[in-house]
């Protein structure tokens, strides 16, 4: 079965600052192994990506290491809200940003606003700062918000006030999906994404396993391995997401790798790896009748391209053996973190080949393109 190249608008590659977890090489290898030909990286690195210098730092690493196509978000901070008024033109053909004075580079994927529980230096608690970013960020460039529950309601209000689109990351709760549904019905320019782990996992102790629709027989994870933001929700919340699929614009992994030593240690950081498990989980849902292949194409290709103004990738597609049955094993994955919350899950549907810009980039478990093959789509 041939599908278009998948797009993940929400991943964390940990470079700069924490490459023992993941870097542009290992992360984009994992992306290709998951069927993704284009990924958008988040800015909460060390240092965070929030100005021209730090964006250059991330893009320099990507140019030399990325194996699939990519773009890099910049973060909204307390001191850069005025930059949107002095926006640079575009990026050079080699991916380096062209600037107009001190303007924020147009080479960014978009603006990420952290408005709720998160790790790092980019959380914004002052709503007057939200207003400045909404007012000044160019309307033709995306704003993505990590906003949960009441803060999500507030950021949707901002979208209505400033009549500009906002994309809500990793929706997980019944109240959130119903609010987004109501906002869309009233013409507010809001879109949203849901992660596979919020579709298939519930908060402990009801896991493991989740097998209500024969989606898998998970052995589950425990302790710090459950830590993720937003947190895993109840079965009622999971059911509400499935019941409102028409409200969900994108499936995004929020690939957030940490090592097992970190997850099993004291003060475990939140986050799950997800690039290599999303497609088989969703294809298994197709097999059980909960999704269609068209649902996957819409939410993992068509809508991400539209929402984030992404260019077409010529001569790009993936091939899937829809009948292959196997168990998910972290030992077979490309991600540097070395574990998955879906270890042992039985799935149906295995990626066979990825063709990116006319070149076979992945086939039967092997990465076939070198670091640096990926291009910056904002270039």
Image (spheres, helix red, strand yellow):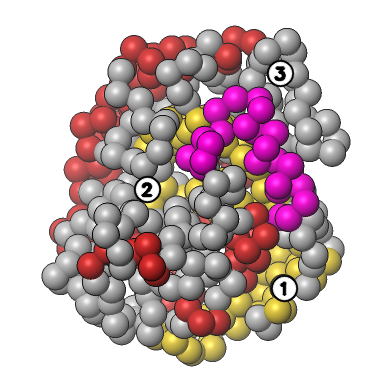
Residue at 38% over, 19% down: 130
Q: Is 49 in the magenta?
A: yes
Residue 291 visible in the snapshot: no
In depth, the one of 247 and 115 nearer the eye is: 115
Question: How many numbered dots are placed on residues in this image?
Answer: 3
SS at mark 3 in the image:
loop
In the rendered image, residue 104 lying in the magenta stretch gets the answer no
Q: Position of residue 331 (x, y in %)?
A: 51, 82
Residue under the image location 84 percent in, 38 percent down:
94
Residue behind mark 3: 88
248 up-or-down from 74: above or below: below
Does residue 363 appear in the picture of this structure?
yes
Q: Quadrant of residue 52?
A: top right
SS of the residue under disc 1: strand
Number of other residues with Cα within 10 Å of mark 1, as a class: few under 14, some 14 to 19, many 20 or more: some
**In what quadrant of the picture does the C terminus appear?**
top right
Please tell me the numbered disc located at residue 367: 1
Residue 140 percent across, percent down from the top left: 60, 24
Q: Residues in magenta?
A: 43-66
């Amino acid at each position: 079965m041939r599908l278009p190249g998948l797009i993940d608008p929400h991943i964390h590659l940990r470079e700069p600052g924490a490459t023992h977890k993941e870097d542009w090489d290992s992360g984009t290898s994992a992306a290709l192994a998951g069927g993704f030909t284009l990924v958008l990286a988040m800015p909460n690195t060390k240092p965070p990506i929030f100005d021209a210098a730090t964006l250059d730092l991330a893009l320099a690493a990507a140019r030399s290491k990325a194996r699939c196509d990519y773009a890099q978000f910049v973060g909204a901070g307390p001191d850069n809200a005025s930059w949107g008024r002095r926006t640079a033109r575009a990026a050079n053909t080699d991916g380096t940003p062209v600037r107009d004075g001190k303007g924020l580079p147009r080479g960014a994927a978009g603006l990420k606003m952290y408005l709720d529980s998160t790790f790092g230096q980019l959380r914004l608690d002052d709503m007057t700062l939200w207003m400045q970013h909404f007012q000044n960020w160019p309307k033709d460039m995306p704003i993505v918000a990590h906003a949960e529950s009441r803060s999500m309601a507030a950021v949707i209000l901002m979208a209505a006030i400033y009549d500009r689109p906002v994309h809500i990351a990793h929706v997980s709760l019944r109240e959130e999906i119903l609010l987004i549904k109501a906002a869309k019905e009233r013409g507010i320019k809001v879109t949203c994404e849901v992660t596979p782990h919020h579709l298939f996992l519930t908060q402990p102790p009801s896991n493991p396993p989740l097998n209500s629709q024969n989606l898998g027989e998970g052995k589950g994870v425990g302790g710090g391995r459950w830590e993720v933001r937003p947190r895993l929700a109840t079965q009622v919340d999971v059911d509400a997401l499935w019941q409102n699929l028409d409200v969900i614009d994108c499936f995004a992994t929020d690939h957030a790798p940490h090592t097992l030593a970190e997850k099993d240690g004291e003060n475990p950081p939140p986050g799950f790896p997800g690039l290599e498990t999303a497609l088989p989980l969703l294809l298994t849902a197709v097999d059980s009748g909960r999704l269609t292949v068209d649902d996957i194409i819409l939410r993992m290709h068509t809508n991400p391209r539209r929402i984030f103004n992404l260019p077409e990738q010529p001569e790009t597609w993936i091939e899937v053996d829809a009948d292959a049955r196997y168990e998910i094993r972290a030992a077979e994955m490309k991600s540097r973190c070395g574990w998955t919350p879906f270890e042992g899950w039985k799935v149906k549907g295995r990626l066979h080949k990825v063709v990116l810009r006319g070149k076979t980039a992945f086939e039967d478990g092997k990465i076939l393109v070198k670091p640096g093959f990926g291009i910056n789509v904002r270039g």
